[in-house]
Image (cartoon, rainbow, N blue to C red):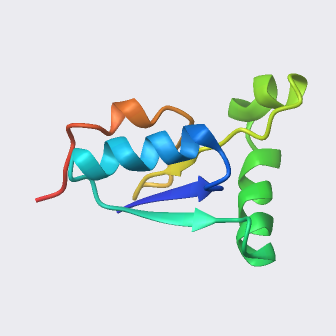
């Protein structure tokens, strides 16, 4: 199951969840708007990964942040659409 870090205040996070739900991809949405523990977990991922360099330079947050079962981190949810779990 995918873990998605983000906030439902973010239009990209809303779109990500909608598309994954429509594609029947299993995920857990971890909304850091409601939890400092989730925010800290996300920041540990973001601050330790060069994947977020462009987002940091642009002053962006870098969400939605998708973590797959193998621990791979991505900012592109479209790669998981069509990969629904059986």
Instruction: Tell whether 26 sits left or right of 86.
Output: right
Quadrant of image for the N terminus: bottom left
* Residue 37 versus residue 50 in the image, above or below: below
Label total for image: 0
Quadrant of image for the C terminus: bottom left
What residue sits 38% from the left and 31% below the top? 78
What residue sits 34% from the left and 41% below the top? 19
What residue sits 20% from the left and 37% below the top? 82
Residue 33 appears at what percent x and percent y?
74, 65
Residue 36 appears at what percent x and percent y?
81, 74
Instruction: Tell whether 33 sits left or right of 83.
Output: right
Residue 77 location, quadrant: top left
Front position in the image: 54 or 24:
24
* Residue 28 versus residue 4 in the image, above or below: below
* Residue 54 versus residue 47 in the image, above or below: above
Residue 32 appears at what percent x and percent y?
71, 65
Residue 69 location, quadrant: bottom left
Instruction: Tell whether 33 sits left or right of 1.
Output: right
Residue 27 appears at what percent x and percent y?
38, 61
């Amino acid at each position: 199951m995918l873990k998605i870090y983000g906030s439902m205040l973010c239009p990209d996070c809303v779109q990500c969840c909608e598309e994954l739900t429509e594609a029947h991809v299993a995920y857990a949405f971890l909304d850091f708007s409601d939890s400092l523990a989730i925010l800290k977990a996300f920041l540990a991922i973001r601050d330790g990964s060069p994947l977020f360099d462009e987002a940091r330079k642009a002053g962006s947050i870098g969400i939605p942040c998708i973590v797959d079962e193998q621990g791979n981190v991505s900012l592109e949810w479209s790669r998981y659409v069509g990969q629904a779990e059986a």
